[in-house]
Image: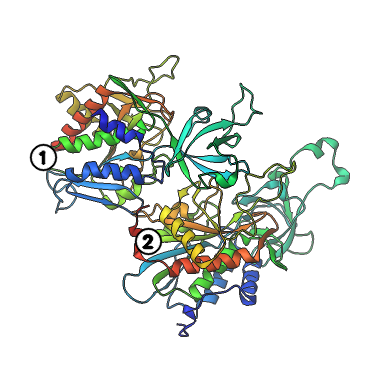
Amino acid sequence: MHTTNESNQTPQVGAGQTSLLERLCNASAVSGDEHEVRQIVIQELQPYAQAIKIDSLGNVLVTREGRGTNRLRVMVAAHMDEAGFILTNDEDDGIYRFEVVGGMDVRFLLGKLVWVGRSHTPGVIGAKPVHLLTSEEKKKTITLDSLRIDLGPGNGNQSKIGERAVFATPFIHLGNSLRARALDNRLGVATLIELVKHPPDNIDLLAAFTVQEEVGTRGASIAGYSLNPDLAFVLDCTSAYDLPAWDDSENSQYNTQLGAGPAIHIAHKPSLSDPRLVRHLEQTAKVENIPYQIRQPGSVSTDTGTIHKQRSGIPSVTVSVPGRYLHSPASLCRLSDWQFTLALIHAALARLTPQVLATER
Amino acid sequence: MKQLIQKLVEIPGPSGYETQIRAAIRAEVQPLADEVYVDALGNLITRKGKLRSGQHNSGEGQRIMIAAHMDEIGLMVTHIDENGFARFTNLGGMRTRSLPGSRVRFVNGPIGVIGLERTIGTNDHPTMTQMFIDLGVTDRGSCPVRVGDVACFERQFLDMGNRLIAKAMDDRIGIYVLIETMRKINSTPHELYFVFTTQEEVGLRGAAPAAFSIDPDLGLAVDVTSTGDTPKDKKMETTLGKGPAIKIRDSKMLSDPRIVDWIVRTAEKSKLPHQFEILEGGTTDASAIQLTRAGIPSGCISIPCRYIHSPSEMVDLHDVQNAIELLTQLLSEKVILQ
């Protein structure tokens, strides 16, 4: 149990936090095999938590109790897993057939470097070279079943069916931006780690580092059931497609914009955010002078999709760091958006009282 | 009676934003119930009848949940452009062809008309992203709504004698049936929970958590269903004016046959007109209740309705009155499932 009084400080994103994010992003955690990220989470939080529970699906559940009476039990969830690949067929001499896990655009895959398994064995997703392509083939979209992961012939590099693979993209700090694979959702994981290290003491913080979000928010549903909180916040990373339109017309479908601060979700495919929690986040942002944006309502899903329907119902809301090119080899985010997200969620938790849920929606 | 129906259908209450309709219903049911509360997802839960002390199926009385949803289909703003036009997405099963030219009212007041990009030809099927709401302003700064604001159809209630037309008959007419049934029931051996649910139109999200907390022995929903009685309609038995429809199946539920049987027997005994419903596309809160916890025997009484999810949904007054009578009979007597 950590005994210093640092829990009352507002956590900041500094060099330590960025270097933790780097470790998280360079770890592999394709849905169903979240081991590497889970180990980092456990290692980071061991000194701060009385008990760390790993539940039946592999969610990491950490509780930090507050002080005083009338404390709300607040679940804060961030998914550890990422979209990636799974080896499905061994075709000998380091060649493997594979499937995608989670949402992935197959057009991204051609010629990309990958890390296979927990050993991060280097591989490449090969394709027919340009010299040999017929003009007909050049017009076609490549299908997944024509692609293979190649670990290199004759070098004894072996893997096995069921092993996961990810794009082999190392994390890089680019001035005010960060570029990495799986910023969705290591940003959420890193933010939640900071909250557990510096929990506001007016609430009981029930942190859930969830599994299998990318394949249908599966881990969060059982975490929501077992934690049975009064309300839930989900920390995620959401797409920003904020580039100018090719014809200079107004881009009206950007989802979110980089540099505009944390994105509050009001509505997405599987859930509607509780209007009281949206209001609470907006009021907090205004009081604390934190920039924020409303994510454009529609499509996508996050862990709130399954959390809000657990038991007798759980008021829920998602706050995301905006990121470009998610589920691709390299996503980009602004450092300031992450900093403001951490500031907003921490301040919103610190200002939570039972009154927030007692008001009309 | 038509006054209350008019009041219920004209209040805007898109999924997730049921505050105003909940307040109106609460004012009606407060004097009729033994207990009234609002749960975590906004369901308005009312109890009528004594709290049962024993276990499930211990005595004569059952714990019965009767659900009708408060929410209606709607729209949510996604973007305000530089000229003050609001782009939007749907909340629930909004049909794009109902939209151009329709007026919509935001829950916070403003009214607008839906326009279509002029690149769309008369024979094209436009998508929602090619439409916008015109709120009569000329720039972003003066637009009275913002991203995330919600609206639904703005349309007056129309009384045609036996036939009633309004937006949101789905499912305010079910709400009306529940309220009037609560008013009519003098005594009941049961512990009845009349539940006015939220978020049905976006995926039956309110009903399941309500059923989890109530943990009933039986579940019923009262909702609208399609008919097959208009020119060149799809083949469907259900007809406007031939009585409340007893659901046998829909796309997500097979009604418990014992419940179907119980409803039929009760209708026959009371000489109430009734018909059956087999719905190919669509479902109700009953399907969510049925799969809650270890499973809850469930069924549904449907009010036949034409032009569902359009701004002008039509029901027959006699079907509504007979549904109230049928539900009152069902809930006033001992339930025998066989």
Residue A92, quarter of the rendered image: bottom right
For label 2, the SS is: helix
Q: Residue furthest top?
A: B231
Label 2 marks which chain's residue?
A
Residue at position x 59%, y 37% in the image: B129
- B264 to A78, vertically: above or below: above
For label 1, the SS is: loop
Residue at position x 62%, y 68% in the image: A24
Q: Residue furthest bottom?
A: A4
Where residue B78 sits: x, y (%)? Answer: 55, 45
- A78 to A108, vertically: above or below: below
Whether callout 2 and callout 1 share a subunit is answered: no
Q: Amino acid at mark 2?
A: Val
Nearer to the camera, B335 or B100: B100
Residue A26, quarter of the rendered image: bottom right
Q: Quadrant of the C terminus of chain B?
A: top left
Nearer to the camera, B38 or B9: B9
Label 2 – label 1 distance at C-alpha: 39 Å
Label 1 marks which chain's residue?
B
Report which residue position mark 2 lands on.
A356
Nearer to the camera, B54 or A208: A208
Q: Amino acid at mark 1?
A: Ser
**What label does residue B187 carry, if any?**
1
Residue A330, quarter of the rendered image: bottom right
Where residue B127 sits: x, y (%)? Answer: 58, 33
Residue B89 showing in the rendered view: yes
Q: Please name which of the two marks, 2 or 1, marks the residue nearer to the observer.
A: 2
Where residue B159 sits: x, y (%)? Answer: 31, 23
**What label does residue A38 carry, if any?**
none
Q: Residue furthest right?
A: A131
- B115 to A259, vertically: above or below: above
Q: Residues within 10 Å of mark 2 (few under 14, many from 20)?
A: some
